[in-house]
Image: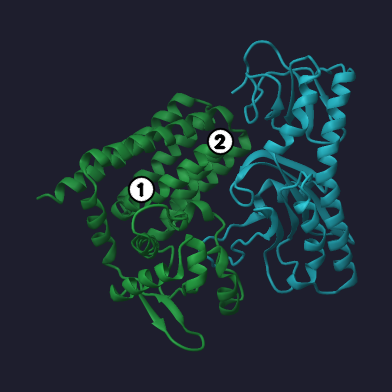
Chain colours: A cyan, B green
Amino acid sequence: MSTDLAPDAGVDAVLEQVGVVVGAAFGLADRIAADVGAVFTDQPTVRRGDLGAVTTLVGPALEDPDGLIQGAGFVAAVDTLADSRWWLEWFMLSNGSAERLIVDTDPRGENFYDYGSLPWYDVPRTTGRRHITGPYVDYLCTDDYTLTFTVPVVVDDRFVGVAGADVRVFTFEKAILPCLRATHRKVAIVNDQGRVVLSNSAHHVSGTLLRAPSPSYRIEDLPLSVVELHHSRDTG
Amino acid sequence: MFRSCVRVTEKGRGGMALRFYGSGAAAVFAPLETLSRSELVERRLTDAIALGLLPDSEQLPGESDLAGIFGVSTTTVREALSSLRLRGLIHTRRGRGGGSFVRAQEEMSAAIVRDRLEELSLAQLRDLGDHYSAIAGTAARLAAERATPDDVQRLGVVCDSLENAEGLGARRRADAQFHIEVAATAQSTRLYRAEVSLQAEVGTLLWLAFGDDESHRRTVQSCRDVVAAIERTNGDAARTAAEERVADSTARLIDLRLALED
């Protein structure tokens, strides 16, 4: 993806629509990060029970019938909360209402899993920047094919966790595909691993890898590009 | 272990005993659909105890919580618990801090395998193997086509934890995790769900039958073979490695089933 794809009105419309979806997810993540950050600024020690602001923000976003968000919340950095080494203050949409995600945060637990190495946590932590994980099969939260948008929560130069939001690939596709088709070009939205998030070509469907370099156009500072597809099949 | 047992365990251990690899490792808790409901609840709990998913002295969620988890009535749960109690697999304490607690038994695995195997005909076992082979083989092939270097690295890490897992329960969970990761790497929600559901159906049987060290060594090697093929982006080799493992397990299960006739 070394050469540039020349944007035209159609591609501009794609960029704008991607901006709407990404903006909704990162917008919520940013608001969660701000509220959680304020708690850490105000209090010398923070406990699980001090994170009530998260559900206040997330509940309405998940339950909005026109909303795009499937799950959202705050995931604490290890050893940051006073009463739990690991913690996910995370809510997901279940039968139309926001439900708390419950996972094993006891390292001795039968199903404990250290989220420290998962990309939605680790990339914002190590880069200090926002990140889009996926598309991936999210067997932790949505149990569905998902994009996860996370931002680092940093208080006085200290990383205290990530705030984030999930968007189902289904939702992303419904929002973006019409304008992708309207470009009248064969194009794909591809992540930085070369994985197709969405395309208007049957040869390059969501989840496949684009191995050959193609003319591309990077979407702002996001790990996403709009890629012009070749006619030959070069995907996996 | 259970999504809805937070309250029970939060008090007890200051942490939460819930599932992360939930859907996979604890597929034994998927909602029940057919047959006598109390028998199925009993079976799922028996399997979980036998596999160490519910370790000795672990407190079970309350009756109404279990009813919610399994999607059955509390009467059904009560029947199942009563039967488990008669079999000595749980004991119940009354009053404050009371409830039902697991009483694991060493020798129970062999007896359970025998019972399960006797229920299945050779043709049914073969068919189960065919189905699992289709799912595992295709998941491995697609994973080889769709894995990024990060995915390969993660699969390697999961292989390591499988190799280092000790005890039946830990090995079974690590194995389940590996196959679920392969299906996730294939980027397929449907294959992932099929894998989870097959784990629930045959995973118990396979692991109760082949939890010994030699079988574990073979399992680890076959998982390494799958990862190596995925790393080479060789879909055919990945499929072959995955199918061979299922064929091997199925043949051994059928041998075991035949031995029961003697």
Quarter of the image with the C terminus of chain A is top right
Position of A155 with respect to B215 (left or right) is: right
Residue B186 falls in image quadrant = top right
Q: Is residue A191 above or below residue B91?
A: above
Q: Amino acid at mark 2?
A: Ser
- Identify the secondary structure beneath mark 2: loop
Mark 1 on the same chain as mark 2: yes
Residue pushed farthest left? Answer: B262
Q: Amino acid at mark 1?
A: Val
Label 1 vs 2, first from the N-terminus: 2
Q: Horizontal and vertical percent for residue B143?
A: 53, 32
Residue B188: mark in rendering: 2
Residue B202: mark in rendering: 1
Residue B253 falls in image quadrant = top left
Q: Is residue A192 visible?
A: no
Instruction: Compare residues A20 and B19 and report the one nearer the observer.
Output: A20
Residue at image location 71% in from the left, 28% down from the top? A198
Mark 2 is surrounded, within 10 Å at the Cα level, by few (under 14), some (14 to 19) or many (20 or more) other residues, namely: many
Residue at image location 54% in from the left, 47% down from the top? B157
Position of A157 with respect to B196 (left or right) is: right
Quarter of the image with the N terminus of chain A is top right
